[in-house]
Image: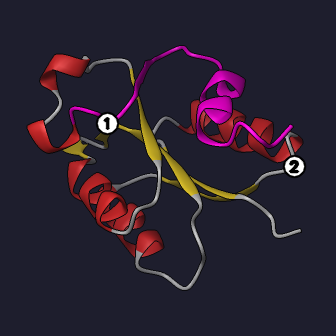
Amino acid sequence: MKNFTVMVAEDEILIALDMVDRLRERGLAVIGPCMSLDDCLDCIDGPQTIDAAILDVDLAGQDVFPAAMLLKDKDIPFVFHSGHCNAASLPADLADVRLFQKPTGVDQIADSLCPTIN
């Protein structure tokens, strides 16, 4: 069976490393952590297959929304994970994307993206 691959976009290193470790413990393959918008865009356009993504809304002072729109255009499921954003402040094109407030646990986020993976 093919590994389910999750891209993690998070610029806070301790949160990022914890997310990556917990996702790998669940048996998921991980791309990242992407620490900037440019990192995200490079990964999305790169050779790896991304099955889903977890996006911090603010990456080093830049909105992650261009990467989110690219994922949406490619029909790759994703969620937002933020400590500073609320659903009402998401762009209209992304208003239907699930937003998890920090500090939501990685397991809950992963379950929403890949519920068939234990």
Q: Which amino acid does label 2 sit on?
A: Gly
- Mark 2 packing: few (<14 Cα in 10 Å), some, or many (20+)? some
In this rendering, does residue 36 appear at all? yes
Q: Where is residue 58 in the image (x, y as percent from the top left)?
A: 29, 37
Magenta run includes residue 109: yes
Task: Return the residue nearer the eye: 4 or 35.
Answer: 4
Q: Is residue 13 left or right of residue 89?
A: right
Q: What residue type is labelled 1?
A: Val
Q: Position of residue 73 (x, y in %)?
A: 29, 66
Say which mark, if any, is on residue 27: 2
In this rendering, does residue 8 appear at all? no
User: Do tag 1 and tag 2 residues touch (Cβ < 8 Å)?
Assistant: no
Q: Marks 1 and 2, how far apart in space?
A: 25 Å
What residue is at 32 percent from the left and 57 percent from the top?
Answer: 72
Task: Classify 38 as above or below 68.
Answer: below
Q: In this view, does 71 lie to the left or right of 90?
A: right
What residue is at 22 percent from the left and 48 percent from the top?
Answer: 65
Task: Return the residue nearer the eye: 116 or 103.
Answer: 116
